[in-house]
Amino acid sequence: MKYFVECNNIFNKKDIYITSSIGEKIFKLKKNRLSNINNVSVYDSSNKLAYRMKVNPLKLKSRYVLTNRDKDVVFYINKSLIYIHDLFFNEKRYIIKGSMFKMKFLLYDYDSVVSTIRVKRVDSKRYFEISVKDELPDVFVLAMLFIAQAIRELI
């Protein structure tokens, strides 16, 4: 399944919509103040709070943590000194590989590619094109988007 997200400036506070390839809006991301540790609130299609992304810039392990409404951890992304390198979802480790300057990243489950994200230009606008295997939940779309946003903050 393919999803598209408009590629904005990382300091832009405008709401971001994740749309499917058929044009259905899946999630709405609303950025909070940068001083707040809950940096991004994620709303579902019925405009109810679904997830919160917490970012702690002082930690390397569990630097990016996505929690649901009940404040249970859905996934977390670890970072080494320079690169973001793995994602943990349901006690399973996924490896992130890709090119930082081409903005193309692959998410691996052992040897198979589970999800990809790349920048695509449509009508003079840049979009993140996120493709996820059909059997995976929609949370992987959020994971790939947060990986791309985190890499953009590093550059």
Image (spheres, helix red, strand yellow):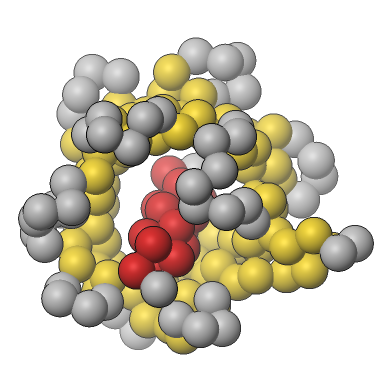
Percent position of residue 106, x then y: 45, 76
Q: Is residue 49 visible?
A: yes
Residue ID at (16%, 74%): 80
Q: Quadrant of residue 14?
A: top right
Percent position of residue 104, x then y: 54, 78
Toward the viewer: 112 or 40?
Answer: 40
Give left or right: position of 102 versus 142: right
Give left or right: position of 36 versus 49: left
Residue ID at (60%, 32%): 15
2 over 49 or under it: above or below: below
Q: Quadrant of the C terminus?
A: bottom left
Residue ID at (11%, 62%): 60
Q: For the image shown, how many numbered marks are present on the structure? A: 0
Toward the viewer: 56 or 43?
Answer: 56
Residue ID at (54%, 36%): 13
Give left or right: position of 149 versus 81: right
Toward the viewer: 117 or 102?
Answer: 102
Q: Quadrant of residue 26?
A: top right
Toward the viewer: 77 or 56?
Answer: 56
Q: Residue furthest right?
A: 123
Q: Quadrant of the N terminus?
A: bottom right
Percent position of residue 8, x then y: 62, 52
Q: Is residue 93 visible?
A: no
Percent position of residue 38, x then y: 28, 31
100 over 22 or under it: above or below: below
